[in-house]
Image (spheres, grey):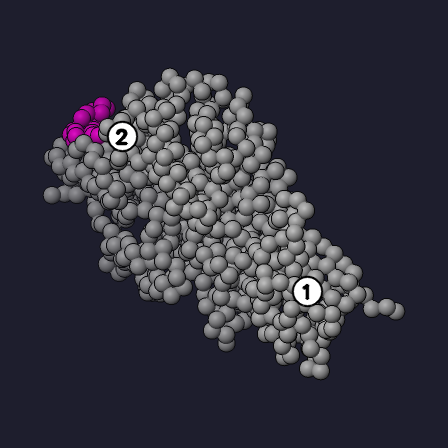
Amino acid sequence: MAQTTIVINDDSAVQNSIQIKDEAAKYSAGILKKYLDKSFSNPFLLETESLNSNATIHLSITNPKNKKEKNNFTIRSDNKDIFLEASNEKFLRYAVYTLLEQWGFRKFTATAFFYPKLSELIYPKNSVKTYRPSFDYRALYYPDAFDSDFREWHKLDWHPNDFSVWGHSFNTLLPAKDYFKSNPEYYAFSDGERRSESLCMTNDNALALVVKKMKECISDNPNASFISVSQNDESIYCECDGCKLQNRKHGGPQGSLYYFLNKIAGYFPQNKIATLAYQHTFSAPINLKIEPNIYTFLCPIDLNRGKVIEKDDSNETFLKTIEEWQKATANLYLWDYTVQFSNYLSPFPNIHTFSDNYNFFKKNNVKGLFVQGYADVPGDFSELRQYILAKLLWDDNVDVNKTTADFLKGFYGSAEPFIAEYLNQLTQNQKQSHRNLDIYSGPIQKRNTFLSADAMHQYDMLIDKAAAAVREDATLSLRVKKLRLALEFVYFEQSKFYGLEKHGMFKLDNDGRKVVEQGLTERVKDFANTCTVLGIYELSEEGISPNTYYENWLAISKSVVHHLGEKLEVKHLSSPSADYSGKGNYSLVDGIKGHNDHNINWTGWYGNNPEIEIISNRLDFNCLKINFLDNQRNWIFTPKSLKVFGYIENNWVLINEVKASNLVENYEVKSNQIVVSDSKLTGLEKIKIVVENQDDLPTWRYRKNKKPMVMIDEIEFYKN
């Protein structure tokens, strides 16, 4: 029976060779030789093409017949030889890496390789396959994508090289600090005044200055293909008469944006003008032809990340939106948010959605993606996430289950079955919860779903088994320890929330004082140290470092108070936000003060005024201390005023009123206390606290359709 495969043997009696037609293929051939020589004891000969050789691999640069053939490569064979052909050097290198992967070589991360020890290389005879990427542009914002060799192996683009200006760019192209004071008409007219957060899309002088700045940026970055002309990360847009007219004609605020972009595109016909379809510009413009050199990044930031897009009933609007964008432009790109930005180490079970979602993007003519992950921070399962996403960016039909199994075995060794089961349990628990998975959520919000105490116990046992399986291997042990960090982080966060309850960080000592559970602070310190060793220099998008996290833990440990009102009955007469209701009514008087994380212990009222009734049971006290969170970055402000009423002879009687200081722009997160001292407080059956929230957002934190929040914890009772 005729042999159907080419066999290249590791035989010292035979000289295997890699042959090139010209110098352009030499670098790629050198890469192939470098890797094959690690698996063969008999090195390959690298030579210029000749007719007399054994088991030859040929590399060549071809002249494409049309533009479509520029972004592909072919691997073919005859009865004896293998041929790698591409139209340029980059895609010839891609062919090399593809062939190496077929022979079992792996680049799991920038530093984790697998070189198989081989006695022979096998390839089918008389075969031909041309490889084309599923997406024209493939940028991955994960730690190892910062490494050029990792990007090359996984066929990735790199936006810092490809864009002369990136992302939200209005403030770069027309800086408010330079022009707003002298020329406010260049900027957005909103709510009756000019605002610096955005530009006027119909002001010709503003347009001219933007074009001038763009020319400078393009000149400074001649190798960049794109330049971003995109709204700032704000909700403001111009509503002057000219912009209003364009918005009415073209379907909304995106109308004036694309009117502006079309004008810019005419100045730069050879450049790719990128922009973001984000917030108020999310929908496609109508009755307007978008110029062919404009590239739109659709930014679906609000999607539920726990379900496949097409299988989530809540995505009906998004499905219509992406359909409209297909009609509006041939250059539809997408910004994919793939991690939890508020907690880089919190488990985020969305990997099971990647394959179906990328099939969906491909089917809907998305031509390129920017996949936002943890940037250069190695967050939870960052290695697996970036590996799978890189594979899908090149081939959206890749078998993700097979790829995942291959990665887990190669990267975690004998720990693989336990980590695979850990991943499976995370995924199944999230699916069964039927709750949204949000990129700005965390362990507190998921304490009753996939991060419940019972689920955490199961995960913990699996990671114990994984650690035991690789305890003799220092490298693999450290990789498993990184997974343990995620469970530790969840436990610490939830323990702060639970306080004195089961699973809480505090207990009562023999004297009735609140103290931290034994050994817990040492665990937090070890967590912070391990994060530092692993290069996890921040734990969230907001930039908190592991060391600061530990310092905050120490501060929280000391934030307990002992006051007369602990465990009094509390009633919310006005409803707090469902997302920020603390542990219920009693969390306002549990003796544990909120620190600077608004997710823990604080109770928040969004756009309404807190009214709180406390059954004081004729308590002998004359001083109240009410603590408020000031976190302006997250639109949490101290109140305008506070009133305390006493229930006297079946009527509410005003006891005291405090007017708060005027708001001042300040982005330090801190707790502010209002003290009410009055002898009339003593002996009351019950009291009522009425807090006046801010009427509107201050100008420096204004965002359209957003309201101010006021947050309270703790309400303390004392006798002075």
Nearer to us in this view, 291 or 305:
291
- The amino acid type found where label 1 is placed reads His
Is the residue marked by circle 2 packed among few (<14), some (14-19), or many (20+) residues within 10 Å? some
Q: Is residue 657 magenta?
A: yes
Q: Quadrant of residue 26?
A: bottom right
Alpha carbon distance from label 2 to label 1: 61 Å
The residue under the point 39% across, 62% down is 535
Nearer to us in this view, 471 or 44:
44
State the quadrant of the N terminus.
Answer: bottom right
Residue 422: image location, x then y, percent: 54, 58
Which residue in the structure is indicated by mark 1?
58
Q: Quadrant of residue 119?
A: bottom right
Q: Could you say whether the residue bearing mark 2 is in a helix, strand or loop?
A: loop
Residue 180: which numbered mark, if any?
2
Residue 591 left/right relative to 247 = left
Residue 102 left/right relative to 569 = right
The residue under the point 60% across, 74% down is 37
The residue under the point 53% across, 44% down is 369
Q: Could you say whether the residue bearing mark 1 is in a helix, strand or loop?
A: strand
Residue 124 appears anywhere in the view: yes
Residue segment shown in magenta: 640-659
Q: Is residue 518 magenta?
A: no
Depicted 272 relative to depicted 92: above or below: above
Residue 261 appears anywhere in the view: no
Is the residue marked by circle 1 packed among few (<14), some (14-19), or many (20+) residues within 10 Å? many
Number of callouts: 2
Residue 697: which numbered mark, if any?
none
State the quadrant of the C terminus.
Answer: top left
Nearer to us in this view, 74 or 24:
24
